[in-house]
């Protein structure tokens, strides 16, 4: 029995991206993170008529949760489907959002311990009043070694254990940054799939993006109005994009005294939301020319910048992104930049052999294991009651119900006020039966603690902390147990999924 992959689709994929004519900008070559496949990826990017499929994510410790890899594998898989369809190079590009400043999200990683419980390692938190340093400038620090040691302690001896740890240790070093380690580790891991890892904080990319950011600032008032109107329309339709707009904030971030800060319109100029630093347009244009690394897009502007810089035909997004990307239409239109198609990334569960053994032992389905804890266990324990006991309990309930109902009818004929006491006695009697049934089940639970513990551990593997597996667990333990070939196997599964989902669009009748 081997590791298997079970899709859990976010939304249907029904629309095929459209080709566009926009060559890859050679100025961005240096922003592609080094990897064993870098030269071949660059050669494909620079072929005439090449397209790209993009996705991206903010950095995470030990490459972050599984969905980060699912995004990259989705881009690689859809690129292959489109390349066959169009007979032109289609390159998957992963945009590392190194400007992101959410250290709390980027600084921890989780896995299943040797005892079958959820384990988490975290870097020390920032102080509440600390500057919001972007992840491309945030050092990991000495504590990253403690996190690596904790992970290593939970990895059982296996063929791929040492190579997995060596891979992480090459990048997650105390002197490395959060974003740099993330980008390097992903570039090596995804190299066999031909994924280009793009460092969005590289000076070459910053210089190319700066003019678009300045243009967004020049259009800030119009964009704020357009976005506010569209958000209101979506709200009336029952949609919540999950991003606040129409409040005077621009789509551009600036690194200042308090770290990465949002620029807000103020009295004909701009002011940073946190530090209250004031800038006019001339000052921001000078920053764009001499210090472009200080400027970055927010989540609504980032995909627009991607489309302005890359020949991208599709962006593969998670559920939250799909919601807020519905707001971006006026941004593309105002900035006169082609809009790439937003499509859902693959979503799914890695089911290990140990989980499948539990499913087979108890004759249950994966969906039952994904239910909240307690429901499945109660059904399994109740199933251990003998047929005679179950029949007796049901007969007793039925007899109590019919007997008291008949008694209630007779009592009401004598005196209508007697109906309520009779019904009260009925409920007490049924409650007594329920108490007996509960005590029987409690005793059975104590006798089945080992088996129920197996169920609990299996659930932790597929729904840790009662959350989707892909949003909690990191990939390293899977690589240590099964080897890097699981990524190639998963890519094949995802490719088949996209091909099947788009079958009608790929082969119209």
Image (cartoon, rainbow, N blue to C red):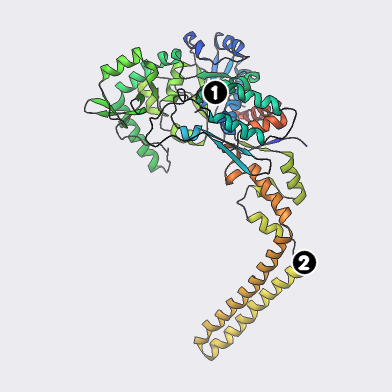
Give the crowd class for mark 2: few <14, some 14-19, many >=20 residues within 10 Å. Answer: few
- What residue would you read off at disc 1? 181
Q: Where the C terminus falls, by quadrant? A: top right
Position in image of residue 472 (x %, y %): 57, 38
In terms of image quadrants, where is residue 40? top right
Q: Where the N terminus falls, by quadrant? A: top right
Does residue 80 appear anywhere in the picture?
Answer: no
Q: Nearer the viewer, residue 427 or 285?
A: 285
Position in image of residue 508 (x %, y %): 61, 26
Which residue occupies 39% across, 41% down?
Answer: 235
Which residue occupies 65% across, 46% down?
Answer: 459
- What residue would you read off at disc 2? 387
- Whether residue 422 is situated above or below residue 331 in the rendered picture: below
Q: Nearer the viewer, residue 69 or 226?
A: 69
Position in image of residue 268 (x %, y %): 22, 25
- Whether residue 38 is situated above or below residue 10 in the rendered picture: above
Give the crowd class for mark 1: few <14, some 14-19, many >=20 residues within 10 Å. Answer: many
- Whether residue 484 is situated above or below residue 398 in the rendered picture: above
Count of marks, rendered view: 2
Q: Secondary structure at mark 1?
A: helix
Q: Secondary structure at mark 2?
A: helix
Does residue 30 appear anywhere in the picture?
Answer: yes
Which residue occupies 30% across, 30% down?
Answer: 275
Position in image of residue 187 (x %, y %): 59, 20
């Amino acid at each position: 029995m081997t590791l298997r992959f079970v899709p859990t689709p976010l939304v249907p994929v029904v629309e095929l991206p459209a080709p566009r004519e926009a060559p890859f900008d050679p100025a961005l070559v240096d922003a592609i993170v080094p990897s064993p496949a870098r030269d071949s990826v660059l050669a494909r990017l620079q072929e005439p008529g090449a397209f790209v499929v993009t996705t991206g994510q903010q950095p995470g410790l030990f490459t972050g949760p599984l969905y980060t890899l699912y995004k990259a594998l989705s881009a690689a898989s859809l690129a292959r489907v489109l390349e066959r369809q169009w007979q032109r190079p289609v390159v998957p590009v992963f945009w590392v959002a190194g400007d992101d400043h959410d250290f709390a999200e980027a600084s921890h990683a989780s896995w299943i311990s040797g005892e079958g419980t959820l384990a988490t390692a975290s870097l020390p938190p920032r102080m509440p009043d600390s500057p919001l340093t972007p992840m491309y400038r945030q050092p990991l620090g000495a504590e990253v070694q403690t996190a690596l040691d904790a992970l290593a302690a939970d990895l059982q001896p296996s063929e791929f254990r040492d190579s997995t740890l060596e891979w992480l240790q090459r990048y997650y070093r105390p002197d490395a940054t959060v974003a740099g380690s993330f980008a390097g580790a992903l570039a090596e891991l995804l190299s066999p799939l031909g994924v280009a890892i793009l460092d969005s904080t590289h000076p070459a990319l910053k210089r190319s993006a700066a003019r678009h950011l300045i243009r967004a600032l020049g259009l800030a008032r119009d964009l704020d109005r357009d976005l506010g109107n569209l958000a209101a329309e979506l709200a009336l339709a029952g949609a919540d994009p999950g991003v606040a707009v129409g409040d005077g904030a621009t789509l551009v971030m600036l690194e200042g005294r308090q770290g990465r800060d949002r620029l807000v319109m103020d009295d004909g100029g701009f002011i940073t939301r946190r530090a209250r630093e004031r800038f006019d347009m001339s000052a921001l244009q000078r920053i764009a020319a001499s210090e472009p690394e200080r400027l970055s897009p927010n989540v609504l502007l980032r995909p627009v910048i991607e489309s302005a810089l890359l020949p991208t035909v599709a962006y593969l997004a998670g559920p939250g992104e799909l919601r807020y990307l519905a707001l971006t239409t006026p941004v593309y239109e105002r900035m006169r930049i082609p809009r790439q198609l937003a499509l859902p990334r693959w979503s799914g569960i890695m089911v290990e052999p140990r989980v499948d053994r539990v499913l087979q032992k108890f004759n249950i389905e994966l969906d039952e294991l994904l239910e909240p804890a307690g429901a499945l266990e109660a059904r399994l324990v109740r199933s251990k009651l003998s047929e005679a006991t179950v029949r007796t309990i049901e007969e007793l309930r039925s007899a109590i119900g019919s007997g008291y109902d008949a008694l209630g009818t007779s009592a009401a004929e004598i005196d209508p006020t007697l109906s309520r006491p009779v019904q009260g006695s009925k409920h007490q009697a049924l409650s007594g039966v329920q108490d007996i049934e509960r005590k029987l089940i409690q005793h059975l639970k104590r006798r089945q603690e080992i088996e129920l513990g197996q169920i609990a551990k299996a659930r932790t593997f597929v729904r840790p902390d009662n959350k989707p597996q892909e949003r909690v667990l990191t990939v390293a333990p899977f690589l240590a147990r099964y080897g890097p070939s699981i990524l190639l196997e998963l890519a094949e599964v995802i490719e088949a999924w996209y091909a099947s989902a788009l079958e009608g669009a790929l082969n119209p009748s």
